[in-house]
Image (cartoon, rainbow, N blue to C red):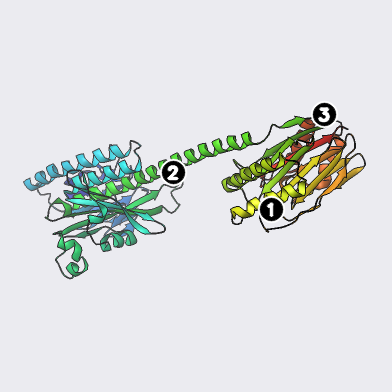
Amino acid sequence: MADAKLEVTDALGSRTVVIDKSTFTIGRRDSNDLRLAGSEVSRDHAEIVNEQGRFILRDRGSRYGSFVNGEGVTERVLAHGDRVRLGRGGGAELIFQAGEVANVPESATATAISDLRHVAALLEGLRALGSGRVLDDVLTLVLDSAIDVGGAERGFIMLANPDTGLELKLARARGRITLPGQGFGTSRKIPEEVFETGKPRIVADLLDGDLASVHMGTVALGIRNVLCVPLRLVRYLERAEQQVGEERIGVLYLDSREKGSLLSDSTRTALETLATEAAVAIENARLYRETIEKARLEQEMRIAAEIQRALLPKASFNGPFFEVAATSIPCRSIGGDFFDYAETPVGRLAFALGDVAGKGPPAALLSAMVQGIFAAQAVGSAEPAKTIADVNSALIRRAIEARFVTLFYGQLAPEGMLTYTNAGHNPPLVVRPGGYERLEAGGPILGLFEGVEFAQASVTLGAGDWLVVFSDGVSEALNEADEEFGEARIADVVHAHQGADGPALLGALVDAVRTFADGTAQNDDITVMVLRYRG
């Protein structure tokens, strides 16, 4: 059998391996003839087959491919001196040599011993990265491991920000010392170039050529040697035929004043492996932080929703001449609708239902404020038009931009006289056995115009008549055919439950809306108040 060997460089260091089988297997799996380390080396990556003295490299369906002299191959006859790379950058490099196998020189032993330090530091860093640390801890571990592996004097990590470009996140020096970011004094040219191209950059001496003029600040610090590698996040896809997704999230930069292992091939390979694993750890830490922040916000929203529910009056309220029931179902955690009712000093039932423009926390805050203003105004004996005008003035004084409120406010007297003002709200319905009547008198929405006068009107309710006040989340609820629920359906539900009590009618209305809109998402708050005059 013809003699051949491979000069191997991977995360485990540099070594020479003899091809001593007719089929020589290569990969990360322990059972391979040549076991390699590297994030882009597959378990069963490639094989070299000796066919009558011809050595043929065959890719075994690896994820990141096999390359000979920079060209991607699935099968290639190897020639003396061919450079084989397994993976695109974070894998392993092999140099094929045919002919007599020379004894491994003693210097190779010294190199292997030196590489063991790289491996130990690398494995320590990778183990720590898998322990679910928070982002600051991950950055510190990555940088300290990189400085140890490279024998660098200092280094930093920059992460990409969609708005501001590369941002310096952490700078450290040998001995696990944190450096102030503003005092690092290094040119951004190399990190930005590496991030833009996705290719590592090694500078053996910044004084060579015209580099000194470009990196004057760095040279002034005595820095001569630089190694900068991209932090690449590889997206693992479900099918082998899918194109591999890759995203650059930042760079890892190291420098030193003296030449050393920072410039060796084994150091570069080890650091590229570390950078690949670090990118995953950094992204996981980012996602973890976002998850914690999201959980905190969700908890705050739950508390806000509980407070909002506590601000609303109890769901049903009965008096000597009336019964009333109401509910508000927000389309998000908290909504912009509200309702309230109270008895006035002159024995009337005062009630209101409002809808603030918008959704979410801003609408909920304004809703709570308007509810408070209404509660303060309604305890007096002013007519509805005067009360609504005062609420409007209070909103105008606060000058809350682009936040408006529709509001219906009414007072029901014991003899059945309902006096009301409608400030731009959906007209409530007075539903009687023979049909229904819309209540429209009033004025514009609140918070828009200063000094507006609001009209008021009165209607007499008979014993057993129902008043239904609702937000547009009820009347404008859509089904899959884009039809609105509409006022007629509201009246039909009331007629069908004319003899029910308030909570039962309220439940029937809400169920009817949900059944009608089944299959479509709720896109607005559903708020309903039903009031029956007993006579």
Tell me the crowding category of disc 3: few under 14, some 14 to 19, or many 20 or more residues within 10 angstroms, Cα based.
Answer: few
* Residue at mark 2 to residue at mark 3: CA–CA distance: 54 Å
Where residue 12 appears, as percent x and y from the top left, is 21, 43
List the residue tagged with mark 3: 320
Which disc number belongs to residue 419?
none
Q: Point out the tag, 1 or 2, that comes first from the N-terminus.
A: 2
Q: Amino acid at mark 1?
A: Leu
Distance from the alpha carbon under mark 1 to that under mark 2: 38 Å
**Whole-percent x and y of residue 350?**
76, 39
- Marks 1, 2: nearer the viewer: 1
Separation of marks 1 and 3 at Cα, in angstroms:
32 Å
Type of the residue with mark 2: Glu
What x and y, as percent, mark residue 103? 9, 47
Residue 361 can be seen in this image = yes
Q: Which residue matches tag 1?
A: 446
Residue 472 place in picture, x, y as percent: 73, 48
Q: Residue furthest left?
A: 106
Residue 502, by quadrant, is top right
**Residue at left offset 16%, top offset 41%:** 116
Element class at badge 1: loop
244 left or right, relative to 58: right
**What SS does tag 2 mark?**
helix
Residue type, label 3 = Pro
Mark 1 surroundings within 10 Å by alpha-carbon count, few (fewer than 14), some (14 through 19), many (20 or more): many
Q: Quadrant of the C terminus?
A: top right
Q: Where 32 sits versus 243, above or below?
A: above
Q: Residue at x 75, y 56 (%)?
A: 453
The front one of 174 and 535 is 535
The image quadrant that residue 306 belongs to is top right
Question: SS class of the residue under badge 3?
Answer: loop
**Label 2 environment density (alpha carbons within 10 Å; few <14, some 14–19, many ≥20):** few
Q: Which residue is mark 2?
A: 290
